Image (spheres, coloured by chain):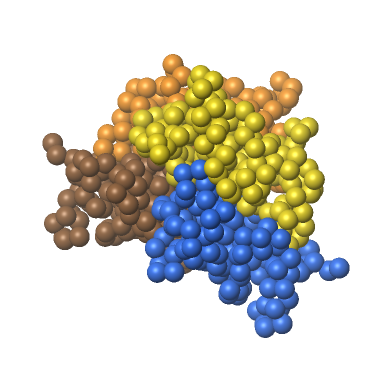
Chain colours: A blue, B yellow, C orange, D brown
């Protein structure tokens, strides 16, 4: 992945309005790899005052999306599974890292870890993507 | 589930700030069962202009949470897996229905379907919960 | 599914040597649906004297395979997830039932339940298949 | 893990009759880690002449079982998910390696890779175990 390609993909990922609304940033991107960051906010808590599984999933899913689109063609999430190990308080900064474990012609798969700044494991996910031939970023 | 118990649980679920921020409503609740509704908003779209997997997951997860807390004790999501079948445009109203398929002493499991108003399947999930003995709603 | 098509598929499924070795029978087959039976044998037990997860999975997977090949084209298992709820003693007869929940052009998905004769849930699985265009049964 | 503990666990794992019938050997064992080997036999093929998903799963599950019982207490498979990437011919030797990614009081989780001798990825699984307090190997 050259620097121009990386910047083009990072620029396109900024059009993700759901991730932007949650303050998720893509802080590293390479072929089949991405790292994202999100700070747990009070408006991300659920009815028992811990971060909603949905916001943890979204952070993991964003790392997955960045990693599977890193090859320059559109890939869509087909299946994701996630295990939740621990909670984190509001104000806590979380990281999600997605690593490609398989890259086929039609599908690819990623291991994703969600951790705190000091490396405590919050959740682990696996994402299976369906690879299309359309370019990413999409042509206007 | 008597009506007072249902109302107490529904009232507690309204403290879920993440679900509230996405406009998710719990529109039906019974023992081991819940149905939720969410309208896809422009701020839920991702970088290729389809609803972010994270918002679809959150809708499914909310139905799961309501269903697994319906027994009056706290249950936490342990594992969720989700398959995405189709997309839906902004403005589309989605429903998630969670049905209990297993209720054990320590764990319970739910089948969750996300559909459009006319019944088109958008995603299907399965959620495995870890059941605690703490009451739900939590005592103040 | 007409009777000739059903018989052709059932005949082909008998070439499954792994299922045959475990005594798994396909006892019902329809479009997107299959039901299989297997008796737990002493040689299926693991090191703590309960049926090995692998034999329960294989029973579920066989119902999945029969159901996803029922449309007359080859479908291959892409992803399967399974939750184990309870054990069953040697001699116990188990059933697996696979029901299609989604049929797309390239993929299809199935809910699979493994139960005892009296309906106790032993395991639940979900299988995602990748659909090829090759005929099933394969032409010689 | 000391050598006596390792030998006691390896000896107990040999009582797994299902794994033994498939010729599965546990070739490495450590705290939260196991590596197993199995040769694909003609009687493991399915109706389209590729290894049955059930035998690949069983190999992965055996590595998972060895790894999650390695701490000297009984752990039972709660949930496993597996993605199949490629096939392998009869006669091919496969390896499954399970690595612990999370060890909690009640649950633990493992990443499992199934590969050929030359490192080609055949399948990847994740296993979530429920940890009991009973000793492993069980006392007679």
- Residue C10 position, x and y percent, is 62, 28
Residue C118 visible to the viewer = yes
Front-most of residues A106 and B20: B20
- State how many labels appear: 0
Residue, x 51% and y 19% (percent of image)? B2
Residue D49: which quarter of the image? top right
Q: Is residue C2 above or below residue C103?
A: above
- Residue D135 position, x and y percent, is 19, 43
Residue, x 48% and y 58% (percent of image)? A90
- Residue C123 position, x and y percent, is 45, 32
Residue A101 visible to the viewer = no
Residue, x 49% and y 24% (percent of image)? B5
Q: Is residue A94 above or below residue D61?
A: below
D55 vs A132, left or right, is left
Residue, x 57% and y 48% (percent of image)? B17
C38 vs A2, left or right, is left
Front-most of residues D124 and B10: B10
Q: Which residue lies furthest to the bottom in this view?
A: A3
Front-most of residues D51 and B35: B35
Q: Residue furthest front?
A: B140
Quadrant (top left, top right, bottom left, bottom right) of the C terminus of chain A:
bottom right
- Residue A36 position, x and y percent, is 56, 68
Front-most of residues A36 and A1: A36
Quadrant (top left, top right, bottom left, bottom right) of the N terminus of chain A:
bottom right
Q: Residue furthest right?
A: A140
B2 vs C41, left or right, is right
């Amino acid at each position: 992945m050259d620097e121009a390609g990386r910047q083009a993909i990072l620029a396109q990922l900024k059009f993700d309005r759901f991730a932007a609304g949650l303050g998720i940033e893509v802080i590293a991107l390479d072929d089949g790899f991405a790292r994202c960051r999100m700070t747990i906010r009070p408006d991300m808590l659920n009815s028992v005052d811990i971060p909603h599984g949905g916001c943890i999933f979204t952070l993991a899913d964003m790392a997955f999306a960045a990693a599977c689109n890193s090859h320059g063609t559109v890939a869509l999430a087909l299946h994701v599974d996630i295990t939740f190990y621990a909670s984190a308080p509001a104000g806590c900064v979380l990281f999600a890292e997605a690593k490609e474990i398989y890259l086929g012609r039609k599908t690819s798969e990623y291991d994703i870890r969600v951790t705190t700044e000091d490396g405590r494991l919050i959740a682990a996910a696996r994402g299976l993507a369906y690879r299309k031939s359309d370019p990413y970023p999409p042509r206007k």
